[in-house]
Image (cartoon, rainbow, N blue to C red):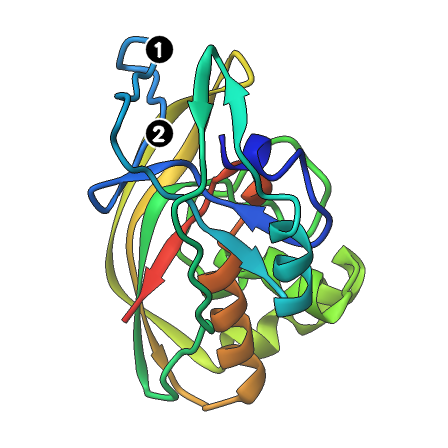
Amino acid sequence: MGKTLLGGVKEGISVSPLKKGGKYLVKYSNLPTFMEVEGGETYSFEVGGKSEDVVKALTDLQERKVFNTSWKVEDVKMREAKVERKGFIEVELLTPALLVDPFRKDKKKRFTNAFFVTFAVNYMDHFKFSREDYAKIALSIEEKVREEPSTMEYARVIYAGKEVVGIMGKFRYTILEKDEEIFTVLEIALAKGIGSSRKNGFGRVSLK
């Protein structure tokens, strides 16, 4: 719905699913395949990316009629994605994430909390790395971070009429070497999400 209110897909940004009462509305495959919204209620969604890309996208935000329902904008708030430079990070996955294979182009996804996999798309997107380039530095990234006991589960989601399997949970990491690139990538993840299909609301995260 957020993409529709913005007038379609915009370059360089991600758009979250609708949010109500602090919870994202995601169509899980073990639930009925329809979702309901109630008239007169307030819903929100998030747009993440570079400030100039977000501002450009928001210029197209306007009242629209979708599914025989009129949607109008009540308020817009801007905030900077900042991550504290500390030695321990907990990443909570708020919507299912689709973690790509950082070493080969494959429709199959990875199911792990390994730091260099979890944030591979963020590294490649921000620093303009190819898979080949990223493969050369993946080990050096992993040497700077240690995975701690984490929780992980899998969620089946209906997307574009098909069932896809994403990963959920709370991933915990100790930062062994406070490399500024690591914190930059974490801030990008906070703003835009992790994994693939971020434009479609997958991989939304919170950090603490």
Residue 75 percent location from the top left of the image: 40, 52
Q: Residue at x 46, y 43 (%)?
A: 16
| Dot 2 amino acid type | Val
Q: Residue at x 62, y 56 (%)?
A: 121
**Number of numbered labels in the structure image:** 2
Q: Nearer the viewer, residue 90 or 31?
A: 31
Q: Which residue is mark 1?
A: 34
Query: Is residue 103 shown to the viewer in this render?
Result: yes
Residue type at mark 1: give it.
Phe
Work out whether mark 2 precedes mark 1 in sequence or the reverse, and give the earlier one: 2
Residue 8 horizontal side relative to residue 143, left or right:
right
Q: Residues within 10 Å of mark 2 (few under 14, many from 20)?
A: some
Which residue lies at the image location 35% right of the left edge and 10% below the top edge? 34
Q: Locate the C terminus by quadrant.
A: bottom left
Query: Judging from the image, what secondary structure is the residue with disc 1 in?
Result: loop
Where on the picture, by quarter, is residue 28? top left
Position of residue 172 measured from the top left corner of the image (x, y, whole percent): 29, 66
Which residue, given by chain and number where applicable, does mark 2 sit on? 26
Residue 179 bears which disc, if any? none
* Pointers 2 and 1 in contact (C-beta within 8 Å): no
- Location of residue 187 with respect to 75 vertically, above or below: below
- The x and y percentages for residue 13 are 63, 52
Residue displayed at 68% across by 67% down: 52
Residue 196 appearing in the image: no
